[in-house]
Each structure stands twice: as structure tokens, then as C-alpha cells.
Image (cartoon, rainbow, N blue to C red):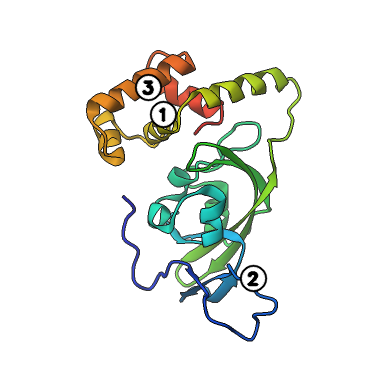
Amino acid sequence: MAAPVPDDMAAFERTDGPSEDAAVQPDDAALVDEPWLGRLVTADALFVTDERQRIRVWSSAAQRMLGYTPEDMLGQVCYGAIMGRRPEGHPVCSVSCPVTRNARRGRGTAAYEVTALAKDGTPRYLTNTVLVIQGRRGAFRVIHMMHESCDRPPSRPGRETSGATDSLAAEALTRRELEVLRLFARGLCLDEVAAELSISVFTARNHNTSIQHKLGVRNRLQMVLEGMRRGLV
């Protein structure tokens, strides 16, 4: 369950009333009153992280893009929630990722391509644009603007056959199995996975066995590594 967010960090809300900008402002534009950002209005998919890489803002457009609600994401560490990867498969989201390291040094980060897994287990191929807002005593916020870049990952020389095989493997896992795999990738144990998904430990164990069988591995560590290699987590 996401950690509570302080009262001074408001989640995105829809603008329902008319305004002077109604002619140019989309109906689904989202606004937030946040001391760091002022009054921010956007219809784009974005999220905001703090110095500890905790998600402080999650827009309604981000929810539509990836399927996660603000309740799912607020208070979560971004690398555990987004788990983005480069098109070639290397992790982007991690503890003290390049975006966060640059922000701590007062630097920006150029836009980059990233693959993220939606709540339903399908991959989303995104371009992430970064804006850093600096405060006092090393405090900062990072605004991540996400745009879908394409319907499938960029082609990689010599990986066409492997990519097709990985796609078939991804389809073989059920939605629940993908959820279990992602929770294991976040470091949860069997009992914690069962509690997180409100299922019995016996059911969680069955999912674990099924995932290992479908991925052709023998233990949970291999399962997570193989899931990462295939872009499932």
C-alpha cells in the first residue's frame, strides 16, 4: 500500500468548472495546487518525484496511459512503480537513477526512450521529458512528462527472432502472473505477495510455480532475471 502523502502535496484533480481558457483548455485537463509547482494545468501524462524518488503527483492522463491510479502510485518509489527499461533491455529506473543524480547536482537530463509496463502487463513505449525544479538546501522536484513514442519497441539488429519469442512468452503469462512476477521483482517474499494481492499463500505459490514453468527457470531469482531480460518487469 502506498505511503501517505503529506497534506501539502495534492494529487491531480479534474477541472470541472468553466474558465476563461475553456476554448483552448481540453476537458480532461488536470490541475494541482502544489507549493513547489504553483498552479499547474496539463492534459499530458506526467508524474512528479521528490529527493527520495517518491512519487508526489500522478496525473489523470498518466492513469489513462499506464492504468495506475493515484492511490496506486502516490508515495511509491518511482523505480519500484515504473520499472522503466531502455529499448535494448537495460534498466533505467533504479535507486539513484541518472535523472535523480543529475537533479541532485542541479543538472537536467535529456529526453530519453523508455519501456514501462502498464498495470495490465502490456508494455508502453514512451519518451520521457524531464524538468527539474530546485529549492533550498538541496531539495528538488522532478517533473516527468510521458508521451507514447510508438506501438512497439525500436528494432534492434540481430534481435528480431528473440523479440518474437519474448512476445509469445509475455502473452503466455496471465495478468495475475505478471502481477506476481512484478511483486517478486520488487523484493517481496511469498507471504507478502499473497497479502498484497489478497490471495492465499497456496495460490501465490501456484502462481510462482506456473511462472517458473512458463519462463523455463528453476528458482525465483532466475525468474526475476528472466522476466527483466524479456522486458516483463
- Report, in whole angstroms, how far the alpha carbon at label 2 lies from the one at label 3: 46 Å
Query: Callout 2: helix, strand or loop?
Result: loop
Is residue 23 positioned above or below 107 on the image?
Answer: below
Choose between 222 and 134: the one closer to the eye: 222
Query: Callout 3: helix, strand or loop?
Result: helix
Choose between 135 and 215: the one closer to the eye: 215
Q: Position of residue 229 (x, y in %)?
A: 55, 26
Q: In the figure, is residue 27 to the left or right of 136? A: right
Q: Position of residue 169 (x, y in %)?
A: 55, 21
In the figure, residue 182 lies in which quadrant? top left
Q: Which residue is mark 1?
A: 177
Q: Which residue is mark 3?
A: 220
| Mark closer to the chain start, 2 or 1 | 2
Is residue 168 positioned above or below 102 on the image?
Answer: above
Query: Callout 1: helix, strand or loop?
Result: helix
Q: Amino acid at mark 3?
A: Arg
Q: In the figure, is residue 5 to the left or right of 112? A: left
- Report, in whole angstroms, how far the alpha carbon at label 2 lies from the one at label 1: 37 Å
Q: Nearer the viewer, mark 1 or mark 3?
A: 1
Q: Which residue is mark 2?
A: 26
